[in-house]
Amino acid sequence: MADWPKTTIELATPKDIAAGSGGAYTSSYNLTSGANGIITMPGLKGFDAPPYNLFYDELPALDGGYPRHSRASSRELFIPLFLAAPDRAGLLGLKRGLIAALNPTLGPCRITFTEGDGSRRYIDAHYASGAEGDEGQDISGFLWTKYGLVLRALDPFFYSGTSHVIKFTTGALEVVPFFGEPFLGRRFVNKAHSLNGSSTITITGDVDTWPLWTVHGPASGMTFMRKVPNGPEQSFTVNAGLSETQTLVIDTRPRRKAVFDPVTGENLWKRLGPSPHLWPISPGLNEVLIDVSNVGAETSVSLAYAPRFISA
C-alpha cells in the first residue's frame, strides 16, 4: 500500500480572502510545513461532527419524548500552534503578525484541509481566544511560544474545494464551464438538462446547500420550483426580461440573498414575485422545474453550488 501524503492545513486570514475578491487567493500560513515558523502541534479539536441541538416534546402519558427537529449549532475549533524564530526580533514579528492577521473585526479566517488524494475542504471561522500570551516555563521561551487558538465557526459545515455546476439549456448549446464568483478552486460541470421541463439532478455533500443561479438571456417570466417528497413544492418567480446579451444572478445563500445584474451591479430584488421561497437543494436526488418564457437558442440557466460536509 502506497504511503498517504501528509494532510496539509492552511490558514487564510481575512485580508487574504478579501484580496481574492471571492475568487482565488493565497493563504498566509501553512500550519503543517513549518516553513513560516509556525506549525500545528498534536491536539486539534472540533474538526469532525459539529454540536447538534435536538428539539423534542416530553410525552405526558408515555415513556420518553417525541422528536421535533434538530439543528447544528456553531462549532468551536481548537488549533494548538508552536511558533519559533532564530532570534528574538524574528519571534516578535511572527507573533505580532499572526495576532494582527487574526483580528475578527476584519472577518473570518478560512481553514483548509488538503488530503493526500488532493481533495480539499474548508471552513470559515472567527478568532475568539488563545493568543493572549502566557510566559509560563512550559508555554513560552526567548525564541519560541505556544498558542492554543480557539476559533468559532458560525456556519458549522465544511465546504468542498470543488464547486459544481448544473446547466439547463434549450438543447441548442453545448455545456460550457462556469467561472463566476464565489466558489473556491476547481469547478465540475454536470451533464446539461432541459429548460421548461422537470429534471432530476444529483447533488453531492452531506447536508442542504443553497445554489447560485445564473440566467443568460433571452428570457422572461422565470419560475424556479423544487418538488419535495412528502412536502409542499418550493418555488420563486422572477419577473424580468433579458435580451440575448443580458445576464441575471439569483443568490439564494443565507445572509447573502440577492438578485442582481452581474455586469452593471443593479439590484433587481424587486423583480422577485410575491412570497419567494429561495429554496435549498438536498444531498441525493432533487426534482426541479425551471420554466422560462421567451427563450432563444442562447438561453441557459446555471445552478452552481459548493457541496457542504459535516466533517473535514
Image (cartoon, helix red, strand yellow):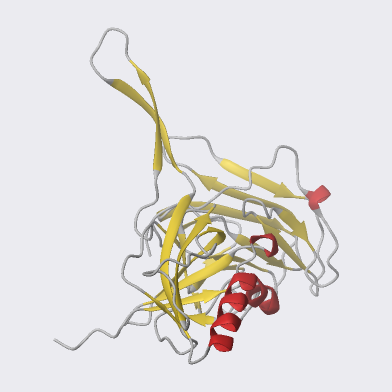
| Vertical relation: 55 (above or below) 268 | above
Quadrant occupied by the N terminus: bottom left
Quarter assignment of residue 128:
bottom right
Q: Can residue 243 be seen in this view?
A: yes
Quadrant occupied by the C terminus: bottom left
Residue ID at (47%, 44%): 73
| Vertical relation: 155 (above or below) 25 | above
Residue 80 image point, x, y percent: 40, 68
Quarter assignment of residue 104:
bottom right
Pick the residue in front: 162 or 223: 162
Q: Is 117 positioned to the left or the right of 149 in the image?
A: left
| Vertical relation: 170 (above or below) 50 | below
Q: How many marks?
A: 0
Furthest residue to the bottom?
Answer: 86
Furthest residue to the left?
Answer: 1
Residue ID at (52%, 80%): 29
Q: Can residue 172 be seen in this view?
A: no
Pick the residue in front: 307 or 223: 307
Residue 88 image point, x, y percent: 54, 86
Pick the residue in front: 83 or 115: 83
Residue ID at (30%, 21%): 65
Residue 62 image point, x, y percent: 25, 12
Residue 278 image point, x, y percent: 63, 47
Pick the residue in front: 186 or 290: 186
